[in-house]
Image (cartoon, rainbow, N blue to C red):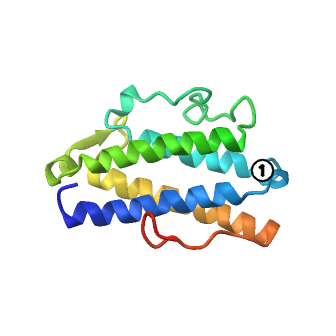
Amino acid sequence: MESTFEADLWNQFGASVEMLENAISICPDEFWNTEERFWYSAFHCIFFLDYYLSSQPKDFVPPIPFDFSEFEDRMPERVYTKTEILAYLSHCKQKSHDLFQDMNPEKLQNRWINESGSMNYSIFEILIYNLRHVQHHAAQLNLLLRQNTNDAPEWVFRVGEK
């Protein structure tokens, strides 16, 4: 990270990922696979977090045991466990940390273009888009937890702060 701008962006991006992690971590086992499909919302969010963090979207491959179900408009073949989902999120946390560690103003201007060309963003914009997507689902999961378990994690102000 070269400047305060990149550091500030990382503080907020990382905080949204930590909020997602906190929601997943406190989800009771008995609520993981109910009709609200908490597990699926978590998986969907992490799958796209991973995809949008890929500098070359055409080369994106999710780690095993995950597949391309999110691109194919179908449910995964099975319910992923909390352990699997948290491991996938850990993979994404490392990927995002590495991306931000190597960030500079020039790299933020590079293009992120999906295979169909329907998404054509600067790296800066896809990071903001990704942050919004993660925060949307973190809030959704927090709402589900609050409504169904009367518990939800606290707000994360910056990455690493509780």
Q: In this view, does 54 lie above or below 93?
A: above
In front here: 13 or 119?
Answer: 13
Q: Position of residue 61 (x, y in %)?
A: 47, 27
Residue 24 shown left or right of residue 97 in the figure: right
Point out residue 70 in the picture as x, y percentages from the top left corner: 58, 36
Kind of residue at disc 1: Trp
The percent coordinates of residue 85 (x first, y second) are 63, 42
> Residue at 68% of width from left, 41% of height from top?
83
Residue drawn at 19 percent across, 47 percent down: 107
* Residue 137 in sight here: no
Q: How crowded is mark 1: few (under 14 residues within 10 Å), some or many (20 or more)?
A: some
Residue toward you, 9 or 71? 9
- Quarter residue 155 falls in: bottom right
Q: Which residue is drawn at 63% across and 49% down?
A: 42
Q: Name the residue under label 1.
A: 32
Q: State how many labels appear.
A: 1
Residue at (68, 33) in percent of width and height:
76
In the image, taking residue 121 as reference, residue 47 lies left or right, namely right
Secondary structure of the residue carrying numbered label 1: helix
Indicate the quadrant containing the N terminus: top left, top right, bottom left or bottom right: bottom left
From what the image shows, is residue 106 above or below residue 68?
below
Asked whether 141 or 102 is in front, the reply is: 102
Residue 25 at least partly seen: yes
In the image, taking residue 40 as reference, residue 99 lies left or right, namely left
Q: Position of residue 77 (x, y in %)?
A: 72, 28
Relative to 155, residue 3 above or below: above
